Image (tube, rainbow, N blue to C red):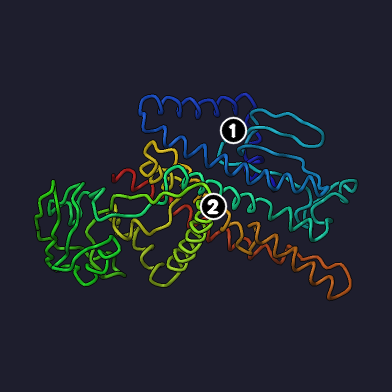
Amino acid sequence: MKDPLEEASSQMTRKGAGFSLLLVLAGLVVLAVVRPSTADTLAIIFGIVALIMLHECGHYYAAKRSGMKVTEFFLGFGPRVWSFRRGETEYGVKAIPAGGYVRILGMNNLEEVDPEDEPRTYRQATVGKRLWTVLAGVTVNFVLAVFLFYLAIVGQGVAGTTTTLRQIVDGTPAAEAGLQKGDTIVAVDGRRIESWEDLPDALADKAGVPTEIVYRRDGQTQSITVTPDQRSRTDSTGFLGVSPEQAFEHYGPIPAVGKSVGVMWETVQGTGEGLANLFSPSGVQQYSENFTNAPKAGSAADQERPRSIIGIVDLGSDLVDGNIWALFGLLGAINLIVGLFNLIPLLPFDGGHAAVAAYEGIASKVQGKRVMVDYQKLIPVSALVLVIFLTLGVSAMVLDVRGLFNG
């Protein structure tokens, strides 16, 4: 790919770009010193950038090994800050540290390439080499995800939930009724709560209904009456506004290998279910209502909506809270989700390039001649996909920023 911001920023000098980058880095350092909790935020940001660059390293390595010409490998976008050339590839840093990219010549049949370089373009490589090159990035994502999950499981264990409250969200029924952090839920309207999974079932028909909550505080059993809210306009189950303390199940180095794969699969299932819910009629309706009716922090509408990088870092900072193992687990999940999204079989995702390569290979064998997809016909589809995901990303960012200011 090309840097999408390079032409727009071509008027900025290298000195100016370097100054801009230094300002960004200096601001982050000052923030970390003034607010020590910012260290978690910075660790997540740098971790995400590192994971993106490792994804690009996968493309870079596969393309080089396949004999393709790689002309650029940069961290960041926009104007160049610093770079050097080794062989035919320019390596360096750009002013906006929001990821990175590898430029491989001839990624489609619309790109104009010097005739001397044509034999080494992506489009002239065999189907096998093209598939290897475009799927190398997501392969790195999946391998890193398993590795990071493994580190988290060996170091801390697999998180489970208890019936003890870790957080009470301000302004919710639980907070207004007087429940406190550290309280342990014992029963709801006479129904005993043995695990956290019992709570949603016990509250299923309690929205707007005064409900007795029996809990244990400082060794003493007490009870209060709470009137749960409706979770959302599309979900009429009861909502309290609480989250549970975690308990960890520990694994040895060998059992942790299988468990890492299991956690990875659970994350894949959860991501698939989340996307299915988001793009369902009720999901679209609920997400749209987030803009006209700001959801309460911790509510179902707030918890179940997609997050931008701002929201991921904000929530991740609370989750990590100085715990290196939690950081590994979070980065593992982000890595896996990035890989899954890149497998979507539509351009401009890696999965789209893989689908085109596979189609060209099969069609060429069937017709007995070289078949190349007309990328001009795919541009409208690619544009539509980009519009959908950009709209989703920008809207999620708007909600995340609003959430930060609303506390």
Is label 1 or label 2 in front?
2
Residue type beneath disc 1: Ala
The residue shown at (73%, 44%) is: 61
- Marks 1 and 2, how far apart at CA: 39 Å
In the rendered image of this protein, does residue 140 appear above or below residue 75? below
The residue shown at (77%, 56%) is: 130
Name the element at disc 2: helix
* Residue hosting label 2: 257
Picture quarter containing residue 81? top right
Residues packed near mark 2 inside 10 Å, few (<14), some (14 to 19) or many (20 plus): some
Q: Is residue 278 left or right of residue 355?
A: left
The quadrant of the image that shows the C terminus is top left
The residue shown at (38%, 71%) is: 282
Q: Nearer the viewer, residue 242 or 192?
A: 192
In the rendered image of this protein, does residue 106 appear above or below residue 225? above
* Residue hosting label 1: 95
Residues packed near mark 1 inside 10 Å, few (<14), some (14 to 19) or many (20 plus): many
